[in-house]
Amino acid sequence: MINRLTIIGVGLIGGSLARALRQARVCREIVGCGRELASLRQAQALGVIDRIELDPGAAVMGADMVVVAVPLGAMESVFRAIAPHVGADAVITDVGSAKASVIGAARRGFGTMPAQLVLGHPIAGTERSGVEASYAELFAHRKVILTPLQQTARSAVERVRDMWQATGAQVVEMSVEHHDKILAATSHLPHMLAYTLVDTLARMGEHDEIFSYAAGGFRDFTRIASSDPQMWHDICLSNREALLAMLDLFIQDLGRLREAVGNNDSAYLLTLFQRAKQARDHFAQQFKA
Ligand code: NAP
Protein backbone atom coordinates (compact mmCIF):
# COMPACT_ATOMS: atom_id res chain seq x y z
CA MET A 1 0.00 0.00 0.00
CA ILE A 2 1.26 3.47 -0.90
CA ASN A 3 0.06 6.22 1.39
CA ARG A 4 0.99 9.24 -0.71
CA LEU A 5 2.28 8.78 -4.26
CA THR A 6 3.79 11.82 -5.93
CA ILE A 7 4.13 11.71 -9.70
CA ILE A 8 6.32 14.40 -11.23
CA GLY A 9 5.41 14.54 -14.93
CA VAL A 10 1.80 13.44 -15.34
CA GLY A 11 2.01 12.58 -19.04
CA LEU A 12 1.55 9.31 -20.93
CA ILE A 13 3.70 7.22 -18.57
CA GLY A 14 3.09 9.06 -15.28
CA GLY A 15 -0.63 9.34 -16.01
CA SER A 16 -0.97 5.69 -16.99
CA LEU A 17 0.86 4.61 -13.83
CA ALA A 18 -1.47 6.74 -11.69
CA ARG A 19 -4.54 5.31 -13.44
CA ALA A 20 -3.32 1.71 -13.06
CA LEU A 21 -2.49 2.10 -9.36
CA ARG A 22 -5.80 3.81 -8.71
CA GLN A 23 -7.58 0.95 -10.45
CA ALA A 24 -5.62 -1.54 -8.33
CA ARG A 25 -6.60 0.46 -5.21
CA VAL A 26 -3.07 0.54 -3.82
CA CYS A 27 -2.71 4.33 -3.26
CA ARG A 28 -4.44 6.45 -0.65
CA GLU A 29 -3.55 9.75 -2.35
CA ILE A 30 -1.92 10.70 -5.67
CA VAL A 31 -0.25 14.09 -5.98
CA GLY A 32 0.58 15.29 -9.51
CA CYS A 33 3.33 17.78 -10.31
CA GLY A 34 4.39 19.42 -13.59
CA ARG A 35 5.09 22.80 -15.12
CA GLU A 36 1.71 23.48 -16.72
CA LEU A 37 -1.28 24.12 -14.48
CA ALA A 38 -3.64 23.44 -17.40
CA SER A 39 -2.40 19.87 -17.99
CA LEU A 40 -2.46 19.12 -14.25
CA ARG A 41 -6.03 20.44 -14.03
CA GLN A 42 -6.90 18.16 -16.92
CA ALA A 43 -5.29 15.22 -15.06
CA GLN A 44 -7.34 16.06 -11.98
CA ALA A 45 -10.54 16.41 -14.01
CA LEU A 46 -9.87 13.00 -15.60
CA GLY A 47 -9.56 11.51 -12.10
CA VAL A 48 -5.89 10.60 -12.66
CA ILE A 49 -4.56 12.60 -9.67
CA ASP A 50 -6.12 13.85 -6.43
CA ARG A 51 -4.06 16.95 -5.82
CA ILE A 52 -1.98 19.41 -7.85
CA GLU A 53 1.39 20.89 -6.86
CA LEU A 54 3.42 23.08 -9.19
CA ASP A 55 6.44 23.15 -6.90
CA PRO A 56 8.31 19.79 -6.94
CA GLY A 57 9.66 20.40 -3.41
CA ALA A 58 6.14 20.85 -1.99
CA ALA A 59 4.89 17.93 -4.09
CA VAL A 60 7.23 15.38 -2.49
CA MET A 61 6.68 16.45 1.13
CA GLY A 62 5.03 13.61 3.05
CA ALA A 63 5.19 11.24 0.05
CA ASP A 64 6.27 7.65 0.67
CA MET A 65 6.69 6.98 -3.08
CA VAL A 66 7.94 9.50 -5.66
CA VAL A 67 7.89 8.68 -9.38
CA VAL A 68 9.81 10.99 -11.71
CA ALA A 69 8.25 10.66 -15.17
CA VAL A 70 9.65 13.70 -16.97
CA PRO A 71 11.77 13.72 -20.17
CA LEU A 72 15.38 12.62 -19.61
CA GLY A 73 16.69 16.16 -20.09
CA ALA A 74 14.56 17.39 -17.15
CA MET A 75 15.60 14.69 -14.63
CA GLU A 76 18.52 16.60 -13.11
CA SER A 77 16.55 19.78 -12.40
CA VAL A 78 13.71 17.75 -10.84
CA PHE A 79 16.16 15.80 -8.64
CA ARG A 80 17.79 19.08 -7.56
CA ALA A 81 14.40 20.61 -6.72
CA ILE A 82 13.18 17.65 -4.63
CA ALA A 83 16.49 16.83 -2.88
CA PRO A 84 15.99 19.07 0.19
CA HIS A 85 12.33 18.10 0.67
CA VAL A 86 11.98 14.38 0.04
CA GLY A 87 11.58 12.29 3.23
CA ALA A 88 14.45 10.07 4.38
CA ASP A 89 12.21 6.99 4.15
CA ALA A 90 10.56 7.88 0.85
CA VAL A 91 11.33 5.67 -2.13
CA ILE A 92 12.16 7.49 -5.37
CA THR A 93 12.05 5.95 -8.82
CA ASP A 94 12.11 7.15 -12.42
CA VAL A 95 10.83 5.83 -15.75
CA GLY A 96 13.48 7.23 -18.12
CA SER A 97 14.18 5.33 -21.35
CA ALA A 98 17.98 5.33 -20.81
CA LYS A 99 19.55 4.63 -17.43
CA ALA A 100 23.25 5.61 -17.27
CA SER A 101 22.36 9.24 -17.89
CA VAL A 102 19.89 9.20 -14.97
CA ILE A 103 22.73 8.16 -12.63
CA GLY A 104 24.66 11.25 -13.74
CA ALA A 105 21.55 13.41 -13.31
CA ALA A 106 20.98 11.97 -9.81
CA ARG A 107 24.60 12.49 -8.72
CA ARG A 108 24.46 16.11 -9.86
CA GLY A 109 20.92 16.78 -8.63
CA PHE A 110 21.11 15.07 -5.22
CA GLY A 111 24.86 15.51 -4.79
CA THR A 112 25.07 11.70 -4.41
CA MET A 113 23.29 8.57 -5.61
CA PRO A 114 20.60 8.11 -2.91
CA ALA A 115 20.16 4.55 -1.59
CA GLN A 116 16.37 4.92 -1.86
CA LEU A 117 16.49 5.88 -5.58
CA VAL A 118 15.62 2.87 -7.76
CA LEU A 119 16.16 3.36 -11.49
CA GLY A 120 13.40 1.85 -13.62
CA HIS A 121 11.99 1.72 -17.12
CA PRO A 122 8.59 0.38 -18.20
CA ILE A 123 8.89 -1.24 -21.62
CA ALA A 124 5.54 0.06 -22.73
CA GLY A 125 4.35 3.17 -24.46
CA THR A 126 2.71 4.60 -27.51
CA GLU A 127 3.60 7.33 -30.00
CA ARG A 128 1.22 9.67 -28.15
CA SER A 129 2.06 12.04 -25.29
CA GLY A 130 0.34 13.81 -22.45
CA VAL A 131 -2.15 12.77 -19.80
CA GLU A 132 -5.00 12.58 -22.33
CA ALA A 133 -3.18 9.66 -23.98
CA SER A 134 -2.73 7.77 -20.69
CA TYR A 135 -4.65 4.61 -19.84
CA ALA A 136 -4.67 2.14 -16.96
CA GLU A 137 -3.87 -0.99 -18.99
CA LEU A 138 -0.67 0.35 -20.59
CA PHE A 139 1.63 -1.78 -18.42
CA ALA A 140 -0.45 -4.97 -18.17
CA HIS A 141 1.60 -8.02 -19.25
CA ARG A 142 4.48 -5.72 -20.23
CA LYS A 143 7.99 -5.75 -18.78
CA VAL A 144 9.39 -3.19 -16.40
CA ILE A 145 13.17 -3.19 -16.06
CA LEU A 146 14.73 -2.13 -12.76
CA THR A 147 18.46 -1.40 -12.74
CA PRO A 148 19.43 -1.15 -9.06
CA LEU A 149 23.02 -0.29 -8.17
CA GLN A 150 25.09 -1.88 -5.42
CA GLN A 151 24.25 0.93 -3.02
CA THR A 152 20.49 0.81 -3.76
CA ALA A 153 18.49 -0.30 -0.70
CA ARG A 154 16.95 -3.71 -1.31
CA SER A 155 13.80 -2.64 0.57
CA ALA A 156 13.36 0.26 -1.90
CA VAL A 157 13.76 -2.10 -4.87
CA GLU A 158 11.06 -4.36 -3.44
CA ARG A 159 8.66 -1.46 -2.94
CA VAL A 160 9.12 -0.35 -6.55
CA ARG A 161 8.73 -3.95 -7.72
CA ASP A 162 5.44 -4.21 -5.76
CA MET A 163 4.19 -0.96 -7.27
CA TRP A 164 4.79 -2.09 -10.86
CA GLN A 165 3.40 -5.55 -10.22
CA ALA A 166 0.18 -3.90 -9.05
CA THR A 167 -0.17 -2.48 -12.60
CA GLY A 168 -0.03 -6.01 -14.06
CA ALA A 169 3.56 -5.63 -15.29
CA GLN A 170 6.29 -8.24 -15.07
CA VAL A 171 9.35 -6.83 -13.29
CA VAL A 172 12.89 -7.87 -14.22
CA GLU A 173 16.28 -6.63 -13.03
CA MET A 174 19.46 -6.05 -15.02
CA SER A 175 22.54 -3.84 -14.99
CA VAL A 176 22.41 -0.28 -16.26
CA GLU A 177 24.91 -1.06 -19.05
CA HIS A 178 22.95 -4.08 -20.23
CA HIS A 179 19.70 -2.11 -20.21
CA ASP A 180 21.15 0.73 -22.28
CA LYS A 181 22.66 -1.69 -24.82
CA ILE A 182 19.47 -3.73 -25.22
CA LEU A 183 17.22 -0.69 -25.50
CA ALA A 184 19.54 0.94 -28.05
CA ALA A 185 18.99 -2.14 -30.22
CA THR A 186 15.29 -2.81 -29.72
CA SER A 187 13.85 0.67 -29.28
CA HIS A 188 16.24 3.52 -29.94
CA LEU A 189 17.60 2.30 -33.33
CA PRO A 190 14.08 1.50 -34.71
CA HIS A 191 12.93 5.02 -33.77
CA MET A 192 15.94 6.50 -35.60
CA LEU A 193 15.09 4.43 -38.70
CA ALA A 194 11.41 5.42 -38.65
CA TYR A 195 12.16 9.12 -38.20
CA THR A 196 14.81 9.07 -40.94
CA LEU A 197 12.66 7.15 -43.43
CA VAL A 198 9.71 9.51 -43.03
CA ASP A 199 11.98 12.55 -43.22
CA THR A 200 13.76 11.28 -46.34
CA LEU A 201 10.44 10.69 -48.12
CA ALA A 202 8.89 13.94 -46.86
CA ARG A 203 11.78 15.91 -48.36
CA MET A 204 11.32 14.36 -51.81
CA GLY A 205 9.59 16.56 -54.40
CA GLU A 206 6.61 14.24 -54.87
CA HIS A 207 6.03 13.61 -51.15
CA ASP A 208 2.24 14.12 -51.29
CA GLU A 209 1.92 11.52 -54.01
CA ILE A 210 4.34 9.14 -52.24
CA PHE A 211 2.41 9.28 -48.96
CA SER A 212 -0.94 8.90 -50.74
CA TYR A 213 0.18 5.48 -52.02
CA ALA A 214 1.60 4.35 -48.68
CA ALA A 215 -0.09 1.19 -47.49
CA GLY A 216 -0.21 -0.88 -44.30
CA GLY A 217 3.48 -1.78 -44.29
CA PHE A 218 4.55 1.85 -44.39
CA ARG A 219 2.03 2.69 -41.67
CA ASP A 220 3.30 -0.16 -39.43
CA PHE A 221 6.92 0.76 -39.94
CA THR A 222 6.54 4.51 -39.41
CA ARG A 223 3.93 4.79 -36.61
CA ILE A 224 6.66 5.53 -34.08
CA ALA A 225 7.87 8.54 -36.11
CA SER A 226 4.84 10.35 -34.62
CA SER A 227 6.50 10.14 -31.17
CA ASP A 228 7.42 13.27 -29.27
CA PRO A 229 10.54 14.90 -30.86
CA GLN A 230 11.85 16.39 -27.59
CA MET A 231 11.63 13.02 -25.85
CA TRP A 232 13.58 11.33 -28.64
CA HIS A 233 16.13 14.13 -28.78
CA ASP A 234 16.78 13.50 -25.07
CA ILE A 235 16.96 9.70 -25.50
CA CYS A 236 19.47 9.99 -28.40
CA LEU A 237 21.81 12.18 -26.43
CA SER A 238 21.33 10.25 -23.18
CA ASN A 239 22.18 6.86 -24.69
CA ARG A 240 24.69 8.20 -27.20
CA GLU A 241 27.43 5.55 -27.04
CA ALA A 242 25.14 2.52 -27.24
CA LEU A 243 23.07 4.15 -30.00
CA LEU A 244 26.19 5.02 -32.01
CA ALA A 245 27.32 1.39 -31.89
CA MET A 246 23.92 0.21 -33.19
CA LEU A 247 23.82 2.90 -35.89
CA ASP A 248 27.31 1.87 -37.08
CA LEU A 249 26.30 -1.78 -37.23
CA PHE A 250 23.13 -0.97 -39.14
CA ILE A 251 24.85 1.41 -41.59
CA GLN A 252 27.36 -1.36 -42.32
CA ASP A 253 24.56 -3.86 -43.02
CA LEU A 254 22.62 -1.33 -45.11
CA GLY A 255 25.80 -0.69 -47.13
CA ARG A 256 26.06 -4.43 -47.82
CA LEU A 257 22.42 -4.51 -48.91
CA ARG A 258 23.03 -1.59 -51.27
CA GLU A 259 25.99 -3.38 -52.77
CA ALA A 260 23.93 -6.55 -53.27
CA VAL A 261 21.12 -4.63 -55.03
CA GLY A 262 23.71 -2.86 -57.21
CA ASN A 263 25.34 -6.18 -58.15
CA ASN A 264 22.06 -8.07 -58.74
CA ASP A 265 23.26 -10.41 -56.00
CA SER A 266 20.19 -12.68 -55.74
CA ALA A 267 21.88 -15.12 -53.37
CA TYR A 268 22.73 -12.39 -50.85
CA LEU A 269 19.24 -10.87 -51.01
CA LEU A 270 17.38 -14.17 -50.64
CA THR A 271 19.62 -15.33 -47.80
CA LEU A 272 19.15 -12.04 -45.95
CA PHE A 273 15.36 -11.97 -46.40
CA GLN A 274 14.98 -15.65 -45.44
CA ARG A 275 17.16 -15.24 -42.35
CA ALA A 276 15.25 -12.12 -41.27
CA LYS A 277 11.82 -13.69 -41.90
CA GLN A 278 12.79 -16.74 -39.88
CA ALA A 279 14.04 -14.59 -37.01
CA ARG A 280 10.96 -12.36 -37.07
CA ASP A 281 8.52 -15.33 -37.24
CA HIS A 282 10.32 -17.04 -34.37
CA PHE A 283 10.31 -13.87 -32.29
CA ALA A 284 6.65 -13.16 -33.09
CA GLN A 285 5.65 -16.65 -32.00
CA GLN A 286 7.79 -16.74 -28.89
CA PHE A 287 6.96 -13.27 -27.60
CA LYS A 288 3.51 -12.84 -29.22
CA ALA A 289 4.72 -9.68 -30.96
P1 NAP B 1 4.88 13.00 -21.83
O1 NAP B 1 3.59 12.34 -22.11
O2 NAP B 1 5.31 14.17 -22.65
O3 NAP B 1 4.89 13.43 -20.30
C1 NAP B 1 5.97 14.11 -19.71
C2 NAP B 1 5.43 14.92 -18.56
O4 NAP B 1 6.51 15.57 -17.93
C3 NAP B 1 4.44 15.98 -18.99
O5 NAP B 1 3.28 15.80 -18.23
C4 NAP B 1 5.12 17.31 -18.65
O6 NAP B 1 4.14 18.15 -18.12
C5 NAP B 1 6.15 16.91 -17.60
N1 NAP B 1 7.38 17.69 -17.62
C6 NAP B 1 8.18 17.95 -18.67
N2 NAP B 1 9.23 18.66 -18.28
C7 NAP B 1 9.10 18.83 -16.95
C8 NAP B 1 9.87 19.49 -15.96
N3 NAP B 1 11.00 20.12 -16.26
N4 NAP B 1 9.42 19.46 -14.67
C9 NAP B 1 8.29 18.84 -14.34
N5 NAP B 1 7.51 18.21 -15.25
C10 NAP B 1 7.91 18.22 -16.52
O7 NAP B 1 6.09 11.95 -21.90
P2 NAP B 1 6.09 10.39 -21.55
O8 NAP B 1 5.94 9.66 -22.81
O9 NAP B 1 5.18 10.14 -20.43
O10 NAP B 1 7.62 10.22 -21.10
C11 NAP B 1 8.03 10.51 -19.79
C12 NAP B 1 9.28 9.71 -19.47
O11 NAP B 1 8.98 8.32 -19.70
C13 NAP B 1 10.50 10.02 -20.34
O12 NAP B 1 11.64 10.04 -19.52
C14 NAP B 1 10.57 8.84 -21.31
O13 NAP B 1 11.92 8.57 -21.67
C15 NAP B 1 9.98 7.72 -20.49
N6 NAP B 1 9.33 6.64 -21.25
C16 NAP B 1 8.51 6.95 -22.31
C17 NAP B 1 7.90 5.91 -23.01
C18 NAP B 1 7.00 6.20 -24.18
O14 NAP B 1 6.78 5.31 -25.02
N7 NAP B 1 6.44 7.38 -24.30
C19 NAP B 1 8.08 4.58 -22.61
C20 NAP B 1 8.87 4.31 -21.48
C21 NAP B 1 9.50 5.36 -20.82
P3 NAP B 1 4.26 19.73 -18.18
O15 NAP B 1 4.46 20.08 -19.61
O16 NAP B 1 3.00 20.21 -17.56
O17 NAP B 1 5.44 20.06 -17.34
Image (cartoon, rainbow, N blue to C red):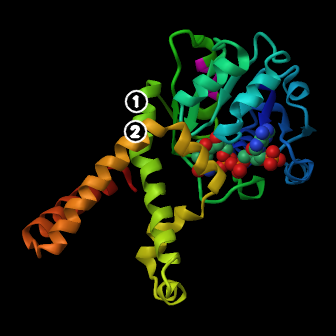
Q: Nearer the viewer, residue 182 or 167?
A: 182
Magenta span of residues:
157-162
Q: Residue at x 77, y 35 (%)?
A: 7
Q: Nearer the viewer, residue 83 or 131?
A: 83
The answer to whether mark 2 and mark 1 are in CB contact below 8 A is yes
What residue is pinned by disc 1? 178
| Left or right of 260 on screen, residue 157 | right
Q: Position of residue 197 (x, y in %)?
A: 45, 68
Dominant secondary structure (helix, strand or loop) of the stretch shown in magenta: helix
Q: Is residue 161 visible?
A: no
Q: Within the image, what quadrant is residue 27 found in?
A: top right
Specify the quadrant that holds the N terminus.
Answer: top right
Picture layout, residue 250 above or below residue 108 = below
Q: Is residue 130 visible?
A: yes
Q: Residue at x 38, y 55 (%)?
A: 288
Q: Nearer the viewer, residue 279 or 72?
A: 72
Q: Position of residue 58 (x, y in %)?
A: 91, 26
Mark 1 nearby-residue class (10 Å; few <14, some 14–19, many ≥20): few
Q: Secondary structure at mark 2?
A: helix
Q: Position of residue 22 (x, y in %)?
A: 77, 41
Q: Residue at x 70, y 23 (%)?
A: 92
What residue is pinned by disc 2? 182
Q: Secondary structure at mark 1?
A: helix
Picture layout, residue 193 above or below residue 212 = above
Q: Is residue 47 magenta?
A: no
